[in-house]
Amino acid sequence: MYASYHLKADELNVDVIQSLKNTFHQREIVILPKDEYDAWEKARHNAAFTEELRNRIKDLDEGKGIGKTMAELEAMVNE
């Protein structure tokens, strides 16, 4: 399960804490400031993007790509 709570620190209260306890039971949770969360998400996205690029380059190296000249690509656009 993936749950995300977005609120300001001064909005934390007993009800929010109880909701977290009910949602996650004995699981470990992490609370991050928004700027740190954003940096983490960016790094995670960049790692996934980099892996996808590596996989595509590997496919091309193995001859799995489709080669087209610029003229062929332009002709496809104009069809």
Image (cartoon, rainbow, N blue to C red):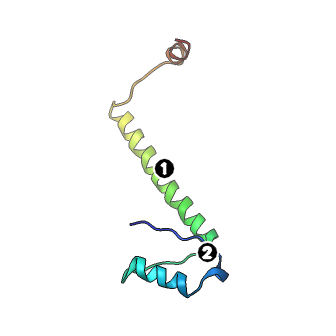
Q: Is residue 33 left or right of residue 79?
A: right
Residue drawn 46% across and 68% down?
3
Residue on which disc 1 sits: 49
Of the 4 image quadrants, the one containing the N terminus is bottom left
Residue at the location (65% across, 76% down)? 8
Residue located farthest toward the bottom when viewing the structure as drawn:
14
> Which picture quadrant has residue 59?
top left
Q: Residue at x 45, y 44 (%)?
A: 53
Q: Position of residue 2 (x, y in %)?
A: 43, 66
Q: In the rendered image, which residue does mark 2 sit on? A: 33
Towards the viewer: 70 or 74:
74
Q: Amino acid at mark 2?
A: Pro
Per the image, label 2 sits on a secondary structure element best described as: loop
Q: Name the residue furthest front.
A: 15
The label on residue 31 is none
Mark 1 residue element = helix
| Nearest-to-viewer mark from 2 and 1 | 2
